[in-house]
Image: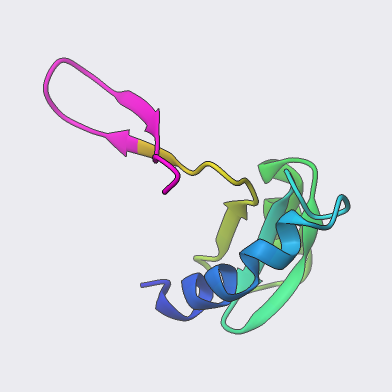
Amino acid sequence: MFETEEKVYLKNKEEWLKDPDKKDKYVLIKGRKVYGFFSTRDLAAEKAVEQKLEMPVYIHHVVAKEPVVILGGAGLHVRFKKEY
């Protein structure tokens, strides 16, 4: 569903992590276009509505350690990927 947006994110992630104005922010991407970086997911979602973007949109937290969510079993578990 978000193949294009994921490619944009992964292509730029390392550069964004070096930029204090982008690191730890939420990026809003639709297609190949980056619409901005926001302090909260809600602000990014508000921008998507304001821009009248077709839903769904891709909002991703720009962080070095990506959480991994595991569903099933005894509940919801979140852990972080190991850095290699």
**Residue 54 at least partly seen:** no
Along the line of sight, the residue nearer the viewer: 56 or 74: 74
Say if 6 sits above or below 65 in the image: below
Closer-to-camera residue (40/67): 67
Check the image and tell me how it is coloured: rainbow
The answer to whether residue 64 is above or below residue 47 is above
Instruction: Give the dominant element type of the magenta stretch: helix, strand or loop.
Output: loop
Find the residue positioned furthest to the front. 84
Residue at the extreme right of the image, as rendered: 21
Q: Position of residue 28 (x, y in %)?
A: 67, 63
Which residue appears at 40% of the width and 77% of the height?
3
User: Magenta residues, as a range?
Assistant: 69-84
| Rendered location of residue 25, percent (x, y) | 74, 47
Residue 16 counted in the magenta span? no
Q: Is residue 75 magenta?
A: yes
| Residue 1 position (above or below residue 63) | below
Rendering coords of residue 41 (x, y %):
67, 44
Q: State the residue at coordinates (62%, 46%).
A: 63
- The location of residue 72, given as percent across then percent down, is 15, 29
Instruction: Quadrant for residue 53, please give it.
Output: bottom right
